Image (tube, rainbow, N blue to C red):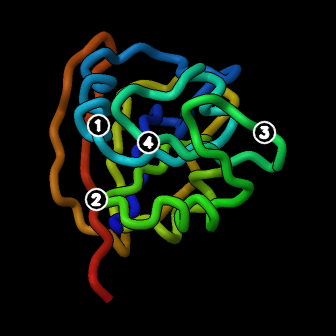
Amino acid sequence: MLISIVVAMAKNRVIGNNGQLPWQLPTDLQRFKRLTMGHTLLMGRRTFESIGQPLPGRRTIVVSRNPGYRVAGCEVVTSIEAGVELAGAAEELFICGGSDIYQQTLALAERIYLTELDAEIAGDSSFPLWSDDDFELLHTELCRDNIDYSFSIWQQMEL
């Protein structure tokens, strides 16, 4: 199973504000849908609650520290490890946030789908610092929307 992080962040690493995306990028959301359709998503409870429902056509695993947390249409686990194990034979597991989940899964990530906005945005949630030293750039493109951004794909190098 390929473990991938998919993230959109501003120049200052912001990924969220008050439990929401602090921008609207319709073309990037369409890309996210194309990338993840038919695959398994792993996300934290707060990220799931900001979306508000399971995303159609995708299996959703929610990580919550509360063992009694339940949500219709999703599977709930109490740890990243349990989520990865539950994903099992999935072809690709997409890690979708938030900050704590990204921090805990950076060492597991074999691929990173990275959207970087060409703007600094105010927010209260950030993507952790990471080094691309162990990754190679597979693809990059400049995109135009209501905010210019770049989209890139990074693949972990073989050791």
Q: Quadrant of residue 30?
A: top left
Circle 1/circle 3 CB separation < 8 Å? no
- 83 to 51, vertically: above or below: below
Q: Mark 2 to mark 3: distance in Å?
A: 34 Å
What residue would you read off at disc 1?
A: 37
Cβ–Cβ below 8 Å for labels 3 and 4?
no
Q: Measuring from the top left, give residue 92's x and y in whole percent.
A: 33, 57
Task: Out of 99 and 10, give the one closest to the viewer.
Answer: 99
The amino acid type of the residue labelled 1 equals Met
Q: CA distance from mark 3 to mark 4?
A: 17 Å
In which quadrant of the rendered view does residue 59 lie? Answer: top left
Residue identifier under label 2: 154
Q: In the rendered structure, which amino acid carries the disc numbered 4? A: Arg
| Residue type indicated by callout 3 | Tyr
Secondary structure type for disc 3: loop
Q: Residue at x 33, y 46 (%)?
A: 39
Q: Which residue is mark 3?
A: 69
Q: Which residue is mark 4?
A: 59
Question: Mark 4 Cα within 10 Å, few/some/many (few <14, many 20+)?
Answer: many
Name the spot of residue 135 as percent of width and height, x first.
32, 69
